[in-house]
Image: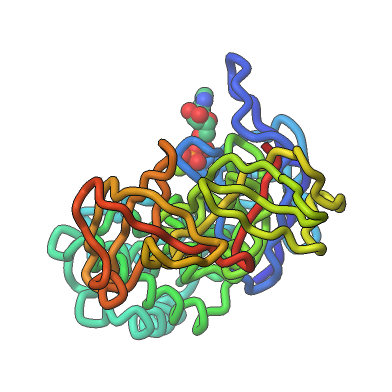
Amino acid sequence: MADLQIENLAKAFKGGFTALNGVSLDVADREAVFLLGPSGAGKTTTLRLVAGLEDATAGRIMIGGRDVTRWTPRERNLAMVYDKHSLFPHLTIYENLAYPLRIRKMSDADIRRQIASVAETLQIEKLLERRPNQLSGGQQQRVAIGRALVRDADVFLLDEPISHLDAQLRARMRVEFKRLQRDFRATMLYVSHDQLEAMTMADRIVLINKGRIEQIAAPQELFDRPATLFAATFIGEPPMNVMQAVISESNGCRFLRIGEAYIEVDKDWMQDGEALRPGDKYLLGLRPQHLSLCPADSTHACRVNGTIFAVETLGSRVVFDIDVEGTVIRAMSTIDAALKYPRTIGAPISFRIDPDFVYLFDA
Ligand code: ADP
Ligand code: MG
């Protein structure tokens, strides 16, 4: 195993399109770092540059402290898993797993030992004599991952390895993967567009958008303290509500006005190191989980009044889309708490804002 460092990586494709711009990140020895972002963000390009399948326009790639930017893929000693399991259809599962080891001229005895160990961890011992078309999609993917793991690679690169599987299988693979990672303790750069995958499996997440890094943080920190509006709205389900807000002042107190509600601005509230001033405009972020429904006749100062725009019931939770002066705000409630409130479109409803869970971004 080894650590991986990417410094100021850039990639402009022929025709001038810049897919990556100044990307720097590092993966510590035996760490699982997730590169997360929407489609087209530059995730696959980053992985292909690290693998040596694509030349960097600028920047440096270091593996185990050595500059490998100009090395061939083979010299870099990486193992890669793609979204489509690329097993050889005419070979048995055993031979598929043995293939990368034979290329490296490992002895038959060592190959047998290595495959036995990986097959046990992946629970594919009983499948070794089958061919890929005799396996389910999940089993095939497990073998593809196994084929990467049998090699003694310095770094593992995975490009959406489970995203094409159905939801149930994906959930199982997430758990399995965590277990595998614990057993193998591999240095891993894992690409995904699925926040759930990254949030549940990553040691750290690198959030990327339009070829630039938005934030690097541990999963919970990314949720609790998003650094940018993009990070705030990309992470979290349902997504964070965003609306305009103006700071106003009366009797020496500062407030944020939302609809008819006033939230007192704490003295400690700062934005970019500066205290908030009356007249300042911000984008206000509120997570649906942090808004609680309340009766329309309550007198809470942080109460916002609106009307029901839509209601979605999701098993144990209910999502209320609430129209507040033409802006739809989403509030999430437990099914028990929701029983007290109307669900008719157009009916009046109110919710309360918890001042401890208010995010501000520059407008
Ligand atoms: P992601 O994996 O995050 O979905 P990619 O890294 O595949 O994104 O692509 C990033 C951007 O670079 C996209 O806009 C894509 O169209 C563009 N791109 C990728 N490969 C090439 C290429 N070979 N030539 C030109 N543009 C490319
Ligand atoms: Mg991709």
294 on left or right of 182: left
Disc tally is 0
In the displayed orientation, state which residue is furthest to the right. 274
313 or 83: nearer the viewer:
313
The correct choice, above or below, for 360 with respect to 26 in the image is: above
Residue sitting at x 66%, y 48%:
228
Assign the C terminus to one quadrant of the image: top right
Task: Decide which of 162, 290 is in the foreground and name it.
Answer: 290
Residue at image location 17% in from the left, 65% down from the top: 135
User: Residue 331, position in %: x, y?
Assistant: 39, 59
Question: Which color scheme did the rendering employ for the protein?
Answer: rainbow
Q: Nearer the viewer, residue 70 or 178?
A: 178
Residue 344 at what x, y percent from top left?
Answer: 19, 53
Vertical position of residue 21 compared to residue 307: above or below: above
Which of the image's four quarters has the N terminus? bottom right
Identify the residue at horizontal 73%, vertical 44% (top origin): 69
What is the x, y in percent for residue 253?
A: 77, 57
Q: Residue at x 55, y 53 (%)?
A: 261
Q: Residue furthest top?
A: 15
**Residue 38: where, in percent of width, then height?**
47, 43
Residue 267 in the image: above or below residue 249: below
Position of residue 276 in the picture relative to residue 78 (left or right) = right
Query: Does the rendering let one see residue 82?
Result: no
